[in-house]
Amino acid sequence: QVRLVESGGGLVQPGDSLRLSCTASGTTLNNLRMSWFRQAPGEKREFVASISGSGSSSYYKDDSIESRFTISRDNAKSTMYLQMNSLKPDDTAVYYCAAGVGIATIRAGLAYDYWGQGTQVIVSS
C-alpha cells in the first residue's frame, strides 16, 4: 500500500519562503508521476505543479507559479519537494501531494491513484 505524507506547512508572512516535502512509503518512486495540488477555503482543489518519475521534466499551473515555486524529487529518499518563494496571501491553502502511474491528464486530480493527507500553508501579515 502506497502512503504519502506531506510536511513543511506553516504560517508565514507575505514574501517569505517555505519548502514542502512529500515522503512516500510502500513503493519505489521511479515510475510514479508526482504532483502538488492545493485547496483554498471554499475553493475547488487545483493543480499546482507536477514532476515526472525521473525528475527530468516538470510542469506548473501557470507562469506566476513557475516563477516562484520549484518542484523537485529525490527518488533515493522517496521524497518530493515544493520550494515556494515570494509567497502571497493567495497561496494560502491546504497543499496535497499526489502520485500515479501513466497519468494522461496531469492537471486532473481524478487521474491520480495516491494522495497524502495535506499540509496547511497560511500566508498572512
Image (tube, helix red, strand yellow):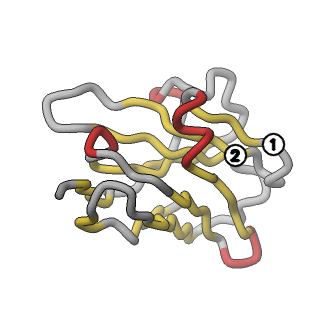
Count of all numbered marks drawn on residues in the image: 2
Seen from the viewer's position, the closer of residues 78 and 119 is 119
Packing grade of label 2 (10 A; few <14, some 14-19, many >=20) is: many
The residue most toward the bottom is 77
Instruction: Name which residue lies at 49% across and 67% down.
Output: 19
What is the number of the mark on residue 8? none
Please tell me which of labels 1 and 2 falls first in the chain.
2
Label 2 secondary element: strand
Instruction: Name which residue lies at 55% across and 60% down.
Output: 83
Residue 5 found in image quarter: bottom left
Q: Amino acid at mark 2?
A: Ile
- Position of the C terminus, as image quadrant, is bottom left
Residue 117 found in image quarter: bottom left
Q: Which residue is mark 2?
A: 51
Packing grade of label 1 (10 A; few <14, some 14-19, many >=20) is: few
Placement of 65 over or under 125, stated as above or below: above
Seen from the viewer's position, the closer of residues 57 and 62 is 62
Instruction: Name which residue lies at 53% across and 70% down.
Output: 23
Residue 76: image location, x then y, percent: 76, 76
Q: Amino acid at mark 1?
A: Ser
Residue 123 found in image quarter: bottom left
Label 1 secondary element: loop
**Residue contact between numbered discs 1 and 2, judged by CB atoms under 8 Å:** yes
Placement of 81 over or under 39, stated as above or below: below
Q: CA distance from mark 1 to mark 2?
A: 6 Å
Instruction: Name which residue lies at 77% across and 50% down.
Output: 53
Seen from the viewer's position, the closer of residues 97 and 59 is 59
Q: Which residue is mark 1?
A: 57
Residue 24: image location, x then y, percent: 55, 67
Residue 6: image location, x then y, percent: 41, 65
